[in-house]
Amino acid sequence: MTSPTSLPDIAEFIADPGVDQAWTDSFYTWMHEHPELSEQEEQTAQHILSRLATMDCAVTKDIGGHGITAVWRNGEGPAVLFRADFDGLPVTETTGVSYASRNPGVMHACGHDVHTTALMAACEILDSRRDVWSGTFIALFQPAEEITKGASAMINDGLAEKIPAPEVCLGQHIYPGPSGTVYSASGPVMAACDTITVTLHGVSAHASSPHNSIDPTYLAAMIVVRLQGIVGREIAAEDFGVVSVGTLSAGHTNNTIPATATLVLNCRFYDAEVRDRTYAAIERVVQAECVASGTPQPADIVYSAHGELTDNDAEVHAVIRPVLDAVFGEDSVDTRRWSASEDFSEIPRHFGVPYEFLLIGCTDRAQWDAAVEADRVDRDIPTNHSGDFLPTKETVRTAADAATSAVLAYLWKD
């Protein structure tokens, strides 16, 4: 691991590693033009594999679907894993750039094309400059993050038997913020999440005779209102919790009261105790409203799409942050907690090792500064998962330098 005297050397190396990376622009452009949905990333995986084939590493493919790992062994030292995800989203691109998505209705609207390109750039630097580092480097390219299945699929497909056991895991994600900025912190940086599907059972009847029914649509509406009271009245003001109803569906015709209704909730937290109390309250409210309406049976409540809290380890942060400060200077700043969720932490949890997850600003600085000055960041800055979300090209270089810096924080040869 690095010593204080190594920091200037690492910063100088990152500024000019002596590796031609002109290819990254075309690699990223191809990624952005050819997004594929979760569990369908066949062409993307081939694109990744074709670049890895130019490097001297041990590659394993088709892990948990289209997952890929590449391992470099370079003498004595710790084993460090860095992960990038590569699936797209069912979003129609509206950026209007020349390299916009060629797949109608599918877009890299969350920056996974940047994550993959940045990790690939780090791979080439470490592959070409083995003279400056020692240990084992593991690059993990993960599919299906958007549906929170990719990490668990790779784990369940024997990931631990396919790669050396890492001693620390690293990753990163781009999000709105001035381009060139690297955010890091210990503790919670991204929220835990779950999807909760609630099926309500009523009694169907003709719409002209509502007295003969137990109306699940009415019941669903009452539950929606009561759920917001959980956040407003049962979660302390200093805690964070989100309970959003993403879907409410009931019935198919205008003159029939349906027999069932379905609610799909999205819930996010920074604290497991707050989460557990909230879920108990959700179940209490749902079932109590069913009793109040006299439903023929209790509601069915199913949990899915689980994402663990992304909770950076303090000791890992103490190793990485000085390197980021040396490399990025005033653009290395404390992370603003982000209420989005990730499945990255399932990988270090599986191996029982600590981790750090970085966040990278991706917004044009002039655009960001203007929005901040006008107090219109929430209105004027495109966000992840929107059709006009487009990181600056500078973001790829920043993310690549951040990934390389974080890895070298552990593997640099003093």
Image (cartoon, rainbow, N blue to C red):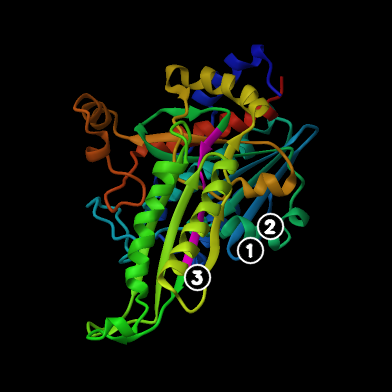
**Residue located 40% across and 36% down the image:** 395
The secondary structure type at the circle numbered 1 is: loop
What residue type is disc 1 on?
Gly
Seen from the viewer's position, the closer of residues 213 and 24 is 213
Q: Are marks 1 and 2 in contact (CB under 8 Å)?
A: yes
The image quadrant that residue 169 belongs to is top right
What residue type is disc 2 on?
Ile
Circle 3 Cα neighbour tier, 10 Å, few/some/many (<14 / 14–19 / ≥20) = many
The secondary structure type at the circle numbered 2 is: helix
Query: What residue is disc 3 on?
Result: 299
Query: What residue is disc 2 on?
Result: 155
* Among the two numbered marks 3 and 2 on one chain, the one whose residue lies closer to the N terminus: 2
Front tag of 3 and 2: 3
Q: Is residue 345 above or below residue 211?
A: above
Residue 58's spot in the image, x, y percent? Answer: 70, 52
Residue 293 magenta: no
Query: What residue is disc 1 on?
Result: 64
Give the mark count.
3
- Distance from disc 3 to disc 2, alpha carbons, whole Å, reads 33 Å
Front tag of 3 and 1: 3
* Among the two numbered marks 1 and 2 on one chain, the one whose residue lies closer to the N terminus: 1
- Distance from disc 1 to disc 2, alpha carbons, whole Å, reads 7 Å
Circle 1 Cα neighbour tier, 10 Å, few/some/many (<14 / 14–19 / ≥20) = many
**Residue located 74% across and 51% down the image:** 163
Furthest toward the right, the residue is 76
Seen from the viewer's position, the closer of residues 338 and 328 is 338
Please say whether residue 23 is visible from this viewpoint.
no
